[in-house]
Image (cartoon, coloured by chain):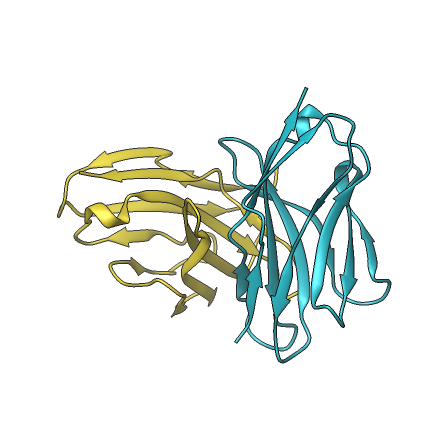
Chain colours: A cyan, B yellow
Amino acid sequence: AQSVTQLDSQVPVFEEAPVELRCNYSSSVSVYLFWYVQYPNQGLQLLLKYLSGSTLVKGINGFEAEFNKSQTSFHLRKPSVHISDTAEYFCAVSNPSGTYKYIFGTGTRLKVLA
Amino acid sequence: EAQVTQNPRYLITVTGKKLTVTCSQNMNHEYMSWYRQDPGLGLRQIYYSMNVEVTDKGDVPEGYKVSRKEKRNFPLILESPSPNQTSLYFCASQDRGAGYEQYFGPGTRLTVT
């Protein structure tokens, strides 16, 4: 069975500082990995995804993530955050050879402080 | 514009009164899914559908029903709502293939008193 762990439920950070949101997964098979963002009172939208190839993935709004197979991690990073990045971030996995089922983490609430 | 729509956006109801939350997508996606979002628990899948007339249980299906009679629509039915079904509900659709992104609706906030 697959699972996703986001250890940090909340991350406060000052504007223009770097941030890393952590995601670890567990799976006995290969996975696809995703980061979604949820702005207040909105649905989720895709930030970036890893399917194969280069382990460093770049997404929208200056975010990037690195797939680390040995550590089963897919941490999300941004070198300089803005107030507008305040949102909840979800890591998710899916099985390339199985159903389309997604497993989501519990989310990390990023709060950018002025 | 490609989108997933849900109605209603907000609903307050009483225990036991049947309700339906509609979901519609205009992207011709085969795969659709319902999630509930609760604080500290993230998104949990309720039901999903691989295509018309093909549905299956997710992780938390108890107390919910779905149907997929048309490709674009995937309603969520609560036959006898209870207070523990108070939650934020999201519908999502996805193109064929596990590597494709899911497109989410705006959410339906349900309160059962």
Q: Compared with residue A77, is residue A28 higher up or lower down, i.e. above or below?
A: below
The residue positioned farthest toward the right in the image shown: A54
**Residue drawn at (16%, 52%), measured in percent from left and top?**
B80
The answer to which of A46 and A80 lies nearer the viewer is A80
Q: Most extreme residue toward the top, as rendered? A: A114
A88 to A8, vertically: above or below: above
Query: Which residue is drawn at the image coordinates 65% and 28% (left, top)?
Result: A112
Q: Give percent across and percent down for residue B52.
A: 44, 65
**Residue A90 seen anywhere in this rendered image of the structure:** yes
Q: How far across and down, in percent of the image, does residue A63 sit?
A: 77, 42
Report the front residue among B19 and B27. B19
| Residue located at (78% from left, 27% from top) | A16
Q: Quadrant of the C terminus of chain B?
A: top left
In this rendering, would A112 be left or right of A5?
right
Query: Residue visible at 27% across and 63% down?
Result: B62
Q: Is residue A74 above or below residue A88?
A: below
Quadrant for the N terminus of chain B, please. Answer: top right
Inspect this view and state whether residue B96 appears: no
Quadrant housing residue B100 = bottom right
The spot of residue A38 in percent (x, y) is 57, 39
| Residue B10, position as x, y percentages in the image | 33, 32
From this view, report whether residue A40 is shown above or below residue A92: above
Left or right, A48 with respect to A109, comes to right
Count every numbered label the image shows and give the total: 0
Instruction: Please identify the residue farthest to the left as the structure is shown.
Output: B16
